Amino acid sequence: MARDDYESVIGLEVHSELSTKTKIFCSCPTGFGAAPNSQTCPICMAMPGTLPVLNEKVVEYAVKAGLATDCEISRDSKNDRKNYFYPDLPKSYQISQFDKPLCTKGKIEIQTNNGKKIIGITRIHIEEDAGKLNHNEFGGGSLVDLNRAGVPLIEIVSEPDLRTAEEVELYLRKLKSILEYIEVSDCKMQEGSLRADVNVSVRKKGETKFGTRTEMKNMNSFRSITRAIDYEIERQIDVIENGGKIEQETLRWDEVSGKTFSMRDKEDAQDYRYFPDPDLVAIKLSEEYIENIKNMLPELPESRKQRYIE
Ligand code: ADP
Ligand code: ZN
Ligand code: MG
C-alpha cells in the first residue's frame, strides 16, 4: 500500500509546571536555575517520617486551567501514589491523581487550514515533579538535583483527536497561550516547564479501530516535536509495510540523529500499583469556591477576539 493510504492518530500528555511560589507539598521555593539541592527540605527529599501538606494554590491554578479549557471540575477529588523506582524520585512514588482527577471532559478549539477543529481534553490532574539527574557534569557519574522534586505540575491529557504534526503544533500553541494568559504557568519549553509526551499510531484510512501506539518523550521545542512525529509516522508505516507489528513502547527522541529509540516497554496502570495517599485528605470543592475562581479568570483570548469582531 502507498503511504497516502495511511493516517496517523495522535494524543498528547502535556506536563506544565505551575508558577506557584512554593512547591506542592512543602514550602520550598520553585524558582528555576538555583544551585543544586539548595531548594530542598526533609519533605521533598523524602526523609522518613515527614508529611506532605497540599498547597491550596495548586488546586486553584489547576481549577483555573480546567475552567479555561471547558472542563468539568470535580467536587470530590483525591491524591494517589504512583509507585515506581528511579533515582530522581526519592520517595519511590510520585503523588499524582488516578481515578478522581480534578478536571475532566474539556476541549480546545484549533483553527486548521480546513477550518475549526475541536480537540477533546480527557482530564487534567495535579501531581509533583521529580528531581533531575545530571550526567557526567561533575567529573563523571550521575548526580541528583532535587530542586525540581515537588514542583507542582498539571498533566493535561488529550483525546486521540489529532491527526497530523501541524494539528499538534496548533493545539500546543493554543494550550500554551491559554496557560500563559491565565497566568498559571510560564510554559518555557527550554526550561522544561512545558513538556509534551506524544502518543502516535497509524492505521489504514477508513479503518475505525486505532492502531498500536508508541509514546515519545524528550522533545524540547516545537520543531523537535514536529520532527519526532513525522519520523515516527514514517517508521511505523515502514514496519507495517514490511509485514511487522508495532510494539507498544515508550521511545526517546534523539535530537542529534533525528530518530526515536526504545526506552522501555510501556507500563500499564497496574504496574504502578496506584493507591490513595493516606497522608493527604480528600479534595472537596464547594460550588462557591469554583464560582469564585470562575470570576477571577480574565476574558480568554478567543472570546476577546470574538467580541472585537462582533
Ligand atoms: P497512559 O499513557 O498513561 O497509559 P492513556 O491511556 O490515558 O495513558 O493515554 C495516553 C494518551 O494516548 C492520550 O493522550 C490518548 O489520547 C493517547 N492515545 C490512546 N490511544 C492512542 C492510539 N491508539 N493512538 C494514538 N494516541 C493514543
Ligand atoms: Zn521541600
Ligand atoms: Mg502515557
Image (cartoon, grey):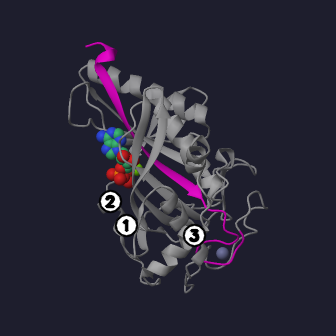
Q: Position of residue 227 (x, y in %)?
A: 53, 28
Q: Which mark is first along the chain, 1 or 3? A: 1
Q: CA distance from mark 3 to mark 2?
A: 36 Å
Between tags 3 and 2, which lies in front? 3
Q: Residue at x 28, y 38 (%)?
A: 212
Going by the image, does 109 lie left or right of 132?
A: left
The N terminus lies in quadrant: top left
**Real-space Cα distance between discs 3 and 1?**
28 Å
**Residue name at image x 33 percent, y 23 percent:** 237
* Residue occupying the point 59% across, 54% down: 179
Residue 118, image x, y percentages: 40, 42
The amino acid beneath tag 2 is Ala
Question: CB of mark 1 within 8 Å of CB of mark 2?
Answer: yes
* Region rendered in magenta: 1-29
Front residue (pair 171, 286): 286
Q: Which residue is mark 2?
A: 269
Total labels: the figure holds: 3
Mark linked to residue 192: none
* Image position of 303 with respect to 261: above or below: below
Disc 3 is placed on an element classified as helix
Q: Is residue 248 rendered to the left or right of residue 13? A: left
| Residue hosting label 1 | 98
Q: Does the magenta run of residues contain 98?
A: no
**Residue behind mark 3:** 295
Work out which quarter of the rendered image holds the C terminus and state it.
top right
Label 1 C-beta lies within 8 Å of the nearest ligand 1 atom = no
* Residue type beneath disc 1: Phe
Give the residue type at disc 3.
Asn
First along the sequence among labels 3 and 2: 2
Q: Residue at x 61, y 66 (%)?
A: 149
